[in-house]
Amino acid sequence: MNRLYHFPLSPFSRKVRLSLAEKRIEVELVEERYWEQDSDFLRRNPAGKVPVLRLGNKLLSESAAICEYLEETHPNPPLMPRDADSRFEVRRLVGWFDDKFYTECTQKLLGERVFRKVMGTGYPDSTNVKAGSRAMRLHLDYMTHLLEHRRWLAGNEMSLADFAAAAQLSCLDYISDVDWNRSEVLKDWYAKIKSRPAFRSLLADQVPGFLPPSHYANLDF
Amino acid sequence: MNRLYHFPLSPFSRKVRLSLAEKRIEVELVEERYWEQDSDFLRRNPAGKVPVLRLGNKLLSESAAICEYLEETHPNPPLMPRDADSRFEVRRLVGWFDDKFYTECTQKLLGERVFRKVMGTGYPDSTNVKAGSRAMRLHLDYMTHLLEHRRWLAGNEMSLADFAAAAQLSCLDYISDVDWNRSEVLKDWYAKIKSRPAFRSLLADQVPGFLPPSHYANLDF
């Protein structure tokens, strides 16, 4: 049986879960408290991070590499366009969300508000939370700018770029940190992606001690 | 004329410079003090980071996406293997060095010792420097482990994974933060990659106020 070692509010796990579900690859989800650096887990992934995917007899880590691998081995439905210029734009945006958005927003908001408590590393640092909220506004505006010119983030087809972005935003939406009233076009984009069957499992996630707001799983939010 | 906006001790700029040189794509190097967030630069790359590559009439950012683009548009000589399993391993390691190695080592050592001074953000934080040195030992041991089973980091052919690693290590070698005596096999790997013509421009880099040690540009170090 295929297995995904993940954590519910890990955006990188979510990105892989979306790819797997869209490509109809069935996996058993195994929740991993990866920060406890259990030796079994470190044997599976010396990087000590989630997600880790057991696919047949292969053990895969690093979410961007996993998504590219799934794309090459299970090309249907495609989550990457065919021509080099469009593929570049998808990868540029995946990098943007995995790195820049994650560091400036997710780590500063979700990291402070949720992971500190879950991992037992103290109280939220309000300077970080403020910086995260400020950065969020810039990122939402950048996404709005993209979506004013395109149906999906990287072009006119849905791609890994949308999954990378939705993976981060859905984690922040779980703690009500996304101001959907800021942009109609962005809200429309999220409504479209949220209503895909691939998204269902994410909307059912629960982290003990943190109840999601009622709009979180609501398709008409 | 093609142009690369870069900074000499930016490992991500170096990774792209190595790919460009190996594929014999000529570029003019333009040094960019990206942290000053000059408006011209931000127009070229809203992420505000180096490298940014102007290739013909295209403007490209995000180093991993750039390297994949170069691979697709200039496939010779190849820096990625052909089969999906081997490509996965290259991308896994590129992710490892771009993300994990960078965060745990480069940012903590080069960030504290050089960038704080260059950017004018205060004195080195010795806790970070110590954590960086400790992490370096683990990373060098992991690389040694890989190289005991393979000619190059991701397999028997040189790939983007070697460039991603060498880009980080060469920046740290500039400030003498790599203990080459720790592993013979690692030193041999670095000697092989350092002697490639693509490496020459990196070995000629200078950052005012920071003189590299004599072994830095020496092929017999």
Image (cartoon, coloured by chain):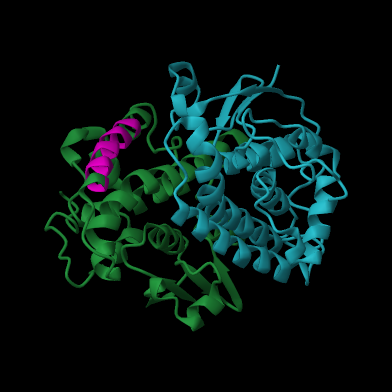
Chain colours: A cyan, B green
Query: Could you tell me residue A48's position as x and y percent?
Result: 46, 30
Q: Is residue B25 magenta?
A: no
**Which residue is more in the foreground, A100 or A127?**
A127
**Which residue is more in the foreground, A21 or B15?**
A21
Question: Relative to A130, is B43 above or below?
Answer: below
**Which residue is more in the foreground, A52 or B77?**
A52
Q: Residue at x 30, y 57 (%)?
A: B111
Query: Could you tell me residue B192's position as x and y percent?
Result: 29, 46
Q: Residue at x 77, y 32 (%)?
A: A204
Question: Relative to B111, is B42 above or below?
Answer: below
Q: Tag count in the figure?
A: 0
Query: Could you tell me residue A69's position as x and y percent?
Result: 64, 38
Query: Could you tell me residue B70's position as x and y percent?
Result: 55, 60
Magenta residues: mostly which secondary structure?
helix
**Which residue is more in the foreground, A11 or A61?**
A11
Camera sees residue B78: no
The image quadrant of residue B24 is bottom left
Camera sees residue B185: yes
The image quadrant of residue A139 is bottom right
Question: Relative to A187, is A29 above or below?
Answer: above
Q: Is residue A11 left or right of residue A215?
A: left
Q: Which residues are magenta?
A: B128-142
Q: Residue at x 23, y 47 (%)?
A: B129
Q: Residue at x 31, y 66 (%)?
A: B201
Q: Is residue B100 left or right of residue B215?
A: right
Q: Is residue A75 left or right of residue A124?
A: right
